[in-house]
Amino acid sequence: MKHYALKLALAVFAAVGMLSISSCEKEENYSIEGFLNKKLYLVKIVDISENVDIVPERDKTLCWLKFNYDNTITGEYVNKIGGIYSMNSNLITIQIGCETLVYDSSGYEDKLIEALNNICTIRSNDSTLFLYYDNEMKYIQFKK
C-alpha cells in the first residue's frame, strides 16, 4: 500500500509540475507591443550552444535600443544606432547599422550589430525582451 501511495504522490507531483511549466509558457509573449517606443537597455548577448554570455563593457544605461511605432529603430552604444524592423507574429527582421563612426576598441558594438541583423524570433515577458537568432541557439536580452 505504501508503494502505491508513493507512486500516486509522484504522479500528482509530476502533473502539477507539468501544469506549472505549461502555464509559464502561456505567459510568454511573442510580441513587441509592450516594448514599443521605450528605451530597452542591453543586458547581454548569449550563445546557448557554447554556454557563453557576453555582457556590455559599458554602463548598461549607455547601451540601449528603442523600437519605434513607425518601424524604425534608434539606439546607442559607442555610436548612434539606427535602422528598421518588420514583424509578422513572433518573427522579426531587423536591418541596422551605425549612424556615427566612433571606433569601438572592444569590438562589442560590432557583435551587437551583427547579432541584431540576424535576429529571427522574439519572445518577451513583462520587462524583458529576448531576440533570438541562429536557430534560437543565440539571443540578445534587453530590459525596460
Image (cartoon, rainbow, N blue to C red):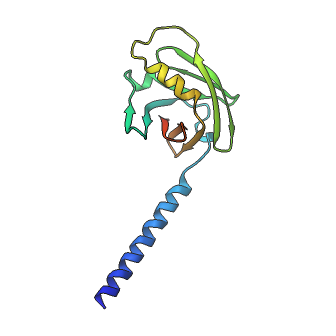
Numbered-mark total:
0
Q: Position of residue 122 (x, y in %)?
A: 58, 41
Comparing 87 with 52, the one in front is: 52
Q: Among all residues in the image, which is located at the extreme left?
A: 2
> In this rendering, is residue 119 above or below 23?
above
Asked which quadrant contains residue 71, the reply is top right
Looking at the image, which residue is at 43% across and 36% down?
47
Q: Position of residue 35 (x, y in %)?
A: 58, 37
Looking at the image, which residue is at 63% across and 29% down?
94
Asked which quadrant contains residue 13, the reply is bottom left
Q: Indicate the quadrant containing the N terminus: top left, top right, bottom left or bottom right.
A: bottom left
Comparing 46 with 82, the one in front is: 46
Looking at the image, which residue is at 65% across and 32% down?
93
> In this rendering, is residue 121 above or below 113?
below
Q: Position of residue 43 (x, y in %)?
A: 43, 32
Q: Among all residues in the image, which is located at the extreme bottom?
A: 1
> In this rendering, is residue 119 above or below 77?
below
